[in-house]
Image (cartoon, rainbow, N blue to C red):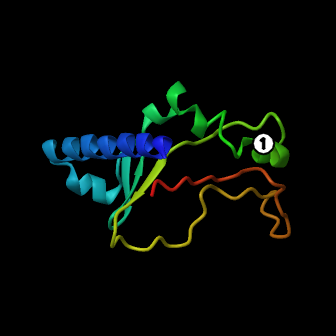
Amino acid sequence: AVQVETCLDVVEEGFKHYMHSVKQLDLQEELLASGFMEIKMRSAGRYDLQLPELSTEPFSFLLQDAPWMPLVHAALGSDATLTHFGCMLSFPGSATQPWHSDGPHMNAGGDPRFVAPVHAVNVFVPLV
């Protein structure tokens, strides 16, 4: 419970900081149109945030010490590496998320019969 509360505090403070900057710099239209490296609006009420603080040592329980890492290593090998780390923030009443791929599909020269081996794992940690 303490870990969830600590993460939630970082998310709430990060969101407030980013939105304050967007408002102060009058960048609301840019946020809606394409977003920024730190914050993107994915749909009404849904934001994708980059929060570097969550990748620091006090939050190792989300990364190298995470309880799901043995499963990740079993599926992908002991040399599996983190390629992206972010936060999805969805407010009550936000638009439902449309189906989407979280990354480009692997293919073998465009062969539609090609099925890629297991090569990625997405982990979402709800903070509710």
Q: Relative to 81, does residue 105 appear above or below in the rendering?
A: below
Q: Residue at x 28, y 43 (%)?
A: 18
Q: Is residue 69 visible?
A: yes
Q: Residue at x 58, y 42 (%)?
A: 84
Residue lying farthest to the top in this orientation: 57
Residue under label 1: 70
Give 61 or 15, whichever is nearer the viewer.
61
Q: Residue at x 71, y 36 (%)?
A: 81
Image location (x, y in percent) of residue 78: 82, 35
Image location (x, y in percent) of residue 68: 70, 46
Image location (x, y in percent) of residue 114: 85, 64
Crowd band around label 1 with a 10 angstrom C-alpha radius: few (<14), some (14–19), many (20+): some
Picture mark count: 1
Q: Relative to 85, does residue 115 appear above or below in the rendering?
A: below
Q: Is residue 38 visible?
A: no
Give 59 or 72, whichever is nearer the viewer.
59
Q: Residue at x 84, y 40 (%)?
A: 77
Question: Hey, what amino acid is under mark 1?
Answer: Pro
Q: Hey, which quadrant is residue 38 in on the image? A: top left
User: Split into 4 quadrants, where in the image is the C terminus?
Assistant: bottom left
| 82 displayed left or right of 4 | right
